[in-house]
Amino acid sequence: MAEATDPLLWDLPAVRHQLGGVSDSTVRRLIARGELPVARVGGRVMVPSAAVREFVAQRTRDAENGGRMNQGALAPTTGESACQNKHKGSLRNRTANSGTRTTAMPAGDALNALLGL
């Protein structure tokens, strides 16, 4: 259980650290998909520490129950590969070369706009 001196909110580098040093983009994907909630304080994007703890606890329960573990931010949610983002709309599509082909990446732009970055 968290002690009263633990901060209620963590900034993104603290979330990365608490999740074992995952990448910044992994944390942003978790936020963009709604797996981690955010609270804006001034101009800062913060994540409730309790939400990070619950995120880890849920995945731990999934693994302990012998069920298929939730694959987290790296797994596509719609059955298509992460490189086959078919999102369309008014977002400006950036492209990235994955070594095999160039694919659209509007999610990064959408997250940056959402987070005000």
Image: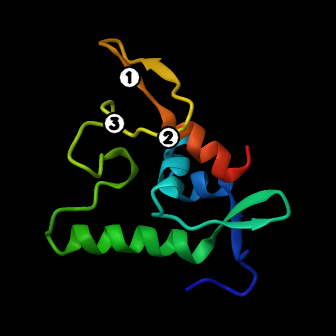
Q: Is residue 59 above or below residue 95?
A: below
Taking the view exactly as shown, the residue that stands out farthest to the right is 42
The residue located at (76%, 82%) in the rendering is 5
Can the viewer see residue 23 in this picture?
A: no
Snapshot quadrant of residue 25: top right
Whole-percent x, y for residue 84 in the image? 30, 32
Q: Which residue is mark 2?
A: 107
**Residue 62 placement (x, y as % from top left):** 25, 70
Mark 3 or mark 2, earlier in chain: 3
Lower sequence index among marks 3 and 1: 3
In the rendered image, residue 55, in percent from the top left (x then y), is placed at 44, 69
Q: Real-space Cα distance between discs 3 and 2?
A: 10 Å
Residue 25 visible to the viewer = yes
Q: In the current view of this chain or complex, which residue is farthest to the left?
A: 66
Depicted 98 relative to depicted 12: above or below: above
Q: CA distance from mark 2 to mark 1?
A: 12 Å
* Label 2: which secondary element: helix
98 relative position to 45: left or right: left
Q: Position of residue 38 (x, y in %)?
A: 63, 65
Labelled pair 3, 2 in contact (Cβ < 8 Å): no
Left or right of 4 in this view: 42: right
Amino acid residing under circle 3: Lys
Q: Which residue is mark 3?
A: 86
Amino acid type, residue under disc 1 in the picture: Thr
> For this view, does 19 lie left or right of residue 103?
right
19 lies above or below 55: above
User: Foreground: 110 or 17?
Assistant: 110
Q: Residue furthest front?
A: 90
Which residue matches tag 1? 103
Q: Amino acid at mark 2?
A: Ala
